[in-house]
Image (cartoon, coloured by chain):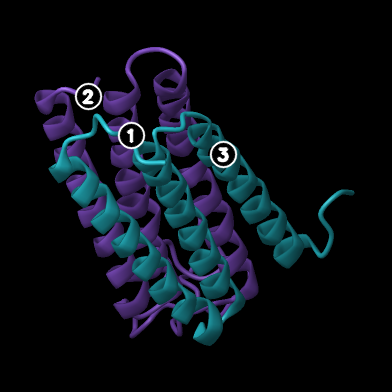
Amino acid sequence: MTGTLQAAVVVVLVGIGLFFLVVGTVGLVRLPDVYNRMHATSKATTLGAASIFLASFAYFGPQGAGLVSLVGIVFLFLTAPTGAHMISRAAQRMGVDFVGDVTWPGGVGVDDPTGEGNGRDPEPEADD
Amino acid sequence: MVAESQPAFLETTVLVGLVVAAAVTLIAGYRVISGPTTPDRVVGLDTIGTNVVAIATLFAIQSDAGFFVDVALVLTIIGFISTIAVARYVTDGDIIE
């Protein structure tokens, strides 16, 4: 039932998906702070799982489980960035700092509720 | 339970994929255990959830059983809901107001 060409497409897609899963996990282990780790996992791991879903679509055909695979890709692409955004906002509210001397853009108090995101003094407001 | 009509190289690739995805999931567990902050652990758990989705899909291909794709879909939704719940709990102190 499974032709050789179809199996070759499945093998290629599974290979791409495994590559992205490995890249995402290496980024999760090796990168220095939580924002960088989220950058690695929320994109690379999502692409890897979506590619494996595509392999499942190529294997099962355009009905039944293959169609469920396409729905899974849509859900993955909707939910993974939303979840990463929620975690990053929670990390910011908790006051997790960046690595090194990286600061929040915009200065003190603009997007930094803890007030200790950067060591600079607040910039004087333009009087008008 | 492996379908007899699968070519040998597809069978081998899916088996290697299952092993690699399981190993990657175990490595992500390191970040969950030793993450310095709570968001690190949440990111690690989210990664484990995505890897388990990949494992379920690969197992659906290996065993030629389509309903494991449904399992993967439901795991995606559950992982999203748990991530949102933990983020809201860390931020606001409660989940449902």
Asked if residue A5 lies left or right of residue A69, the reply is: left
Q: Quadrant of residue A115?
A: bottom right
- Badge 1 vs badge 2, beta-carbon distance below 8 Å: yes
Q: Residue at x 43, y 18 (%)?
A: A67
What residue is disc 1 on?
B3
Q: Residue at x 71, y 63 (%)?
A: B91
Disc 2/disc 3 C-alpha distance (Å): 23 Å
Amino acid beneath label 1 = Ala
Q: Quadrant of residue A14?
A: top left
Asked if residue A84 lies left or right of residue A10, the reply is: right
Pick the front one: A8 or A20: A8
Query: Residue A103, how many percent across, how many down?
Result: 40, 74
What residue is disc 3 on?
B71
Q: Which chain is purple?
A: A
Query: Where is B67 relative to A51, above or below?
Result: above
Query: Residue A110, how many percent across, how many down?
Result: 53, 61
Viewer can see residue A114: no
Asked if residue B54 lies left or right of residue A20, the reply is: right
Q: Are marks 2 and 3 on the same chain?
A: no
Crowding at dot 2, Cα within 10 Å, few <14 / some 14-19 / many 20+, comes out as some
What residue is disc 2 on?
A2
Crowding at dot 1, Cα within 10 Å, few <14 / some 14-19 / many 20+, comes out as some
Viewer can see residue A29: yes
Amino acid beneath label 2 = Thr
Q: Quadrant of residue A4?
A: top left
The disc placed on residue B50 is none
